[in-house]
Image: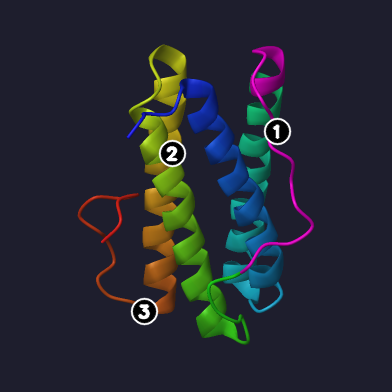
Amino acid sequence: MRQPSAGEALASALSAEYAAIYAYGRIGVRLTGAARDAARQAEAAHRRRRDALVVQLTTGGGVVPPDRAGYALPFPVTDRASALRLAAEMEERTAAHWRAALASTTGADRDQALAALVEYAVRATRWRKTAGSTPLTVPFPGRPT
C-alpha cells in the first residue's frame, strides 16, 4: 500500500476537521452550561485548524478538498449522553487522521500533526470524563482499537 504524500495526508486531516465542525453543530445544541462552553471552544479550535490548513494547502500548491453540506454521524444525537459520546468519538476520529499524517510529514508539518493528535487525545479524554465513561484514556490515541 502506497503511503500518502504530505499534501494528501494534510488534505485528509482537513476533511476530518470539516466533519468535526459539522458534528459540533449537532453536539452543542444538546449540552448546557460548562459542557456547552467546552463544545463551543472545541468547535472554535477545529475551525482554527481548518482555516490554517486551507491557507497552508492553498499557498503550498496542495489540493484543498471541498467541504460538504453535511456528514453522516455514527449514531443519532438525541440527548446529553449521546452528544458527549459523539464529542469524544469525533475527537478520536480526527486524531486518527492526524496520527496518519505523522508518517507522511516532516519538520513543521510533522510538529503540526503531533500537536493536533495530542490536543484531540486530551480533549477526547475530557469528554469521556464529562460523560462518566471508562476508561478515560486509550493506550494509543488516534489508533483504531
Work out how far the residue at label 1 is from the one at label 3, CA to CA, in angstroms.
Answer: 32 Å
Residue type indicated by callout 2: Trp
Q: Position of residue 122 (x, y in %)?
A: 38, 51
Name, please, the residue furthest toward the right. Answer: 69
Q: Quick one: SS at disc 1?
A: helix
The residue identified by callout 3 is 132
Residue type indicated by callout 3: Gly
Front residue of 39 and 46: 46
Tell me, yes or no, whether the highlighted magenta stretch contains residue 70. Answer: yes
Image position of 52 (left or right of 137): right
The residue identified by callout 2 is 98
Front residue of 74 and 85: 74
The residue identified by callout 1 is 51
Residue at image location 20% in from the left, 55% down from the top: 139
Q: Give the range drawn in magenta.
A: 57-72
Q: Nearer the viewer, mark 1 or mark 3?
A: 1
Image position of 71 (left or right of 3): right
Mark nearer the N terminus (1 vs 3): 1
Tell me, yes or no, whether the highlighted magenta stretch contains residue 43. Answer: no
